[in-house]
Image (cartoon, rainbow, N blue to C red):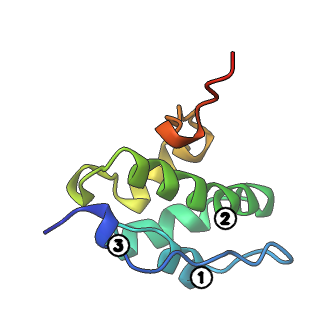
Amino acid sequence: MSMLSLVTTVHKPDLSETPDFETVWKLFPRRVCKKAASVAWGKLDPDQKQEVLKAIPVHVRFWKSQRTEIRFIPHFSTWLNQERWTDELEMSMPVENIRRDF
């Protein structure tokens, strides 16, 4: 089974300092093409690295909410090179959270 829901741990990032590659690599659910991802990570400035660190958990929640299969999650290098952390994600609200008193 290759569903993202099988990723068992979602690490909470430490936002107090500029993260290193190994830290963010462990956060991203599709860990393939590590060398290319490391090169892409090295091109980012410290502010971008902080933005990436904040965005990964949001994207992981989005992929889980959409039940995205792992094969449809971009490689980390692609996600970085295309600045996908800046994508606007439309989170669908779970039915139990929808207000019924309108």
- Residue 19, x across and y down, in percent: 71, 77
Q: Residues within 10 Å of mark 3 (few under 14, many from 20)?
A: some
Q: Which mark is residue 31?
A: 3
Q: Which mark is residue 23?
A: 1
Residue annotated with mark 2: 53
Q: Position of residue 57 (x, y in %)?
A: 58, 61
SS of the residue under disc 2: helix
Q: Is residue 46 left or right of residue 83?
A: right
Q: Secondary structure at mark 3?
A: loop
Q: Residue furthest bottom?
A: 22
* Kind of residue indicated by mark 1: Thr
Rendered location of residue 67, percent (x, y): 31, 50
**Quadrant of the frame with the N terminus:** bottom left
Quarter of the rendering containing residue 83: top right
Residue 43 vs residue 2, the one in the foreground:
2
Which of these two is toward me, 90 or 27?
90
Left or right, 4 with reference to 100: left
Amino acid type for the residue under numbered disc 2: Leu
Find residue 15 and report its horizontal and vertical position in percent. 80, 72
Label 1 close to label 2 by CB (< 8 Å): yes
Residue reaching furthest to the top: 102
The picture quadrant where one finds residue 12 is bottom right
* Label whose residue precedes the other's in the sequence (2 or 3): 3
The residues bearing labels 1 and 2 have C-alpha atoms spaced at a distance of 9 Å
Query: Viewer-proximal residue, 27 or 5?
Result: 5
Kind of residue at badge 3: Arg
Residue at 33% of width from left, 65% of height from top? 5
Q: Residue at x 69, y 15 (%)?
A: 102
